[in-house]
Amino acid sequence: MKVILLADVKNVGKKDQVIEVSDGYAVNFLFPRRLAVQMSKKSAEVLETQQEQKRENEAKLVAEAQKLVKVLEDITLEFKVKTGREGKLFGAISAKQITDELLRLYNVDIDKRKFIDKGPFDRLGFYEIRVELHKGVVGKIRLHLVGEEK
C-alpha cells in the first residue's frame, strides 16, 4: 500500500515522503497513530500544494536574508572598551552585546546562535564576523574595538 508520511518514522522514512508499506503495517500502526495517510489522488494534490507553499516560503526567507546581507554590508559597529596601559582589554565583546547593539542602533534582529565566528573579540582593532542568516546565506558584520585607557 502506498502511503504519505505525516511525520518522520524511524527506519521507514521522512515527513511528506511517499513510500510503499505492507497493508497490515499501515492499517495497524501508521494510520492509528496518525503517522501516515493512504496515497490517493486527493492526498497527492494536497501534498503537492503543501510542498509548493513550502518552496514559496523558503524563497521568501532566502530573499529576506539576502536583503539583510546588503544592509549588514554598510554597518560597522564601534565599541569603546576599557584597556590597561599596554592596550589589553578588560574582558571581551560577546555575540550577545553585538546583537543588542545591532537591534538598538539599526533595528536589525539577529539571533546570537547564528554567528559563525564566535570570538573572543578581545583585542583592539577591526573584526569581520560571519553570520549565517539562512541556510547558505552568510552575511558579514564589521566590528571595531576602540580603546579608552582607564
Image (tube, rainbow, N blue to C red):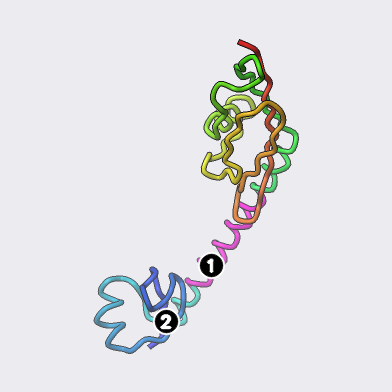
Displayed quadrant of residue 69: top right
- Up-down relation of residue 74 to residue 3 (above or below): above
In the structure shown, which secondary structural element does the residue marked by tag 1 occupy?
A: helix
Q: Which residue is mark 2?
A: 39
- Alpha carbon of mark 2 to alpha carbon of mark 1: how far? 16 Å
Instruction: Specify the quadrant that holds the C terminus.
Output: top right
User: Going by the picture, which residue comes out furthest to the top?
Assistant: 150
Position of 49 compared to 124: left or right?
left
Is residue 25 placed above or below 60 in the rendered structure? below
Which labelled disc corresponds to residue 23? Answer: none
Mark toward the start of the polypeptide (2 vs 1): 2
Q: From the top left corner, tell me how far across and down residue 7 is, in percent.
A: 38, 68
Q: Amino acid at mark 1?
A: Gln
Quadrant in which residue 74 is drawn: top right
Task: Say which element carries label 2.
Answer: loop
Would residue 4 appear left or right of 49 to someone viewing this image? left
Asked whether, in this view, residue 49 is left or right of residue 26, the answer is right
The residue depicted at 55 percent of the width and 35 percent of the height is: 95
Instruction: Give how far across and how far down residue 129 sits, in percent.
Output: 66, 40
Q: Magenta span: helix, strand or loop, mainly?
A: helix
* Residue 55 sits inside the magenta stretch: yes
Where is 102 relative to 38, above or below?
above
Dot 1: within a 10 Å radius of its alpha carbon, few (fewer than 14), some, or many (20 or more) residues? few
Q: Nearer the viewer, residue 64 or 53?
A: 64
Q: Position of residue 70 (x, y in %)?
A: 73, 41
Residue range of the region highlighted in magenta in the rendering:
46-63
Q: Amino acid at mark 2?
A: Met
Residue located beneath label 1 in the image: 51
Residue density around tag 2, few if under 14, some if 14–19, many if 20 or more, within 10 Å: some
Observer-nearest of 50 and 110: 110
